[in-house]
Amino acid sequence: MSHSAADAGGHADPGGLGAGHDDGGERAAVAAPGGRSRAELGIAALLGVAGVVVLWDASRITVPYSVSDVVGPKTMPVIVGSLLVVSAVLLAVNVLRGGSGQAEEGEDVDLSHPTDWKTVLPLIGFFILNIVLIDPLGWVLSGTIMFWGSVWSLGSRHYVRDGLVSLVLAVGTFYGFYLGLGIHLPAGILAGIL
């Protein structure tokens, strides 16, 4: 059974979907001016600003003339900054042409519930604590506290197991950065031991 390209009143139905077809409100969301398109343009602007800042910061990286490596310290920031700017432009063009992102429909996410600040605030607190403690204590201890605090914030109450797993993760990332990438994370009070 095919739908007519015109409704009962003789008006054209450009989608050929027929009268009474429910398209989930997509056309209304695209046609409706207001908050959603402004928010998406705001995201495009933030992406563009972030890209420009990354590119500007990359231009300030000084590389000694004697470095003959093709892939120097500027390469990744320039690539990331350029991709951010290109993504911002493409998103802005898409939004201005009427495009709109789809709302999150994850099966395990109930968008009608408010933010769970009892979980979010401790997580933020443990990340800030890590920033404060990383220099004096070193990555292994501050990272262990951050990992343990994160799983505690998310509801785990296996204190000893979580502490051991957090310590293994912190030591593993410490040596992973050191041996794999040549990046020295702060050792802090464990400077002679690690």
Image: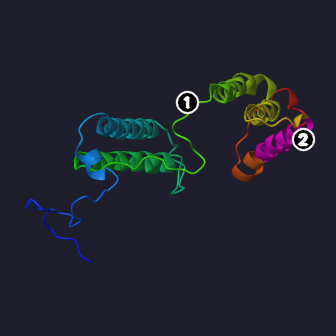
Amino acid under disc 1:
Pro
Q: Is residue 123 left or right of residue 106?
A: right
For residue 167, side relative to residue 184 (left or right): right
Indicate the position of residue 78 as horizontal and vertical percent values.
Answer: 44, 47
Cα separation between marks 1 and 2: 31 Å
> What amino acid type is highlighted by mark number 2?
Arg
Q: Quadrant of residue 14?
A: bottom left
User: In x, y percent, where is residue 146?
Assistant: 75, 32
**Bounds of the magenta span?**
160-175
Which percent across, then down, holds residue 156? 80, 37
Residue under numbered circle 1: 114
Instruction: Assign the C terminus to one quadrant of the image.
Output: top right
Label 1 CA crowd tier, 10 Å (few <14, some 14–19, many 20+): few
Q: Would you name the residue on which mark 2 appears?
A: 161
Give the image quarter of residue 121.
Answer: top right
Residue at screen point 54% across, 56% down: 69
Task: Give the SS element for disc 2.
Answer: helix
Based on the picture, tell me whether residue 24 belongs to the magenta stretch: no
Question: Which quadrant does the N terminus fall into?
Answer: bottom left
| Near-viewer residue (40 or 65) | 40
Is 161 colored magenta in this rendering? yes
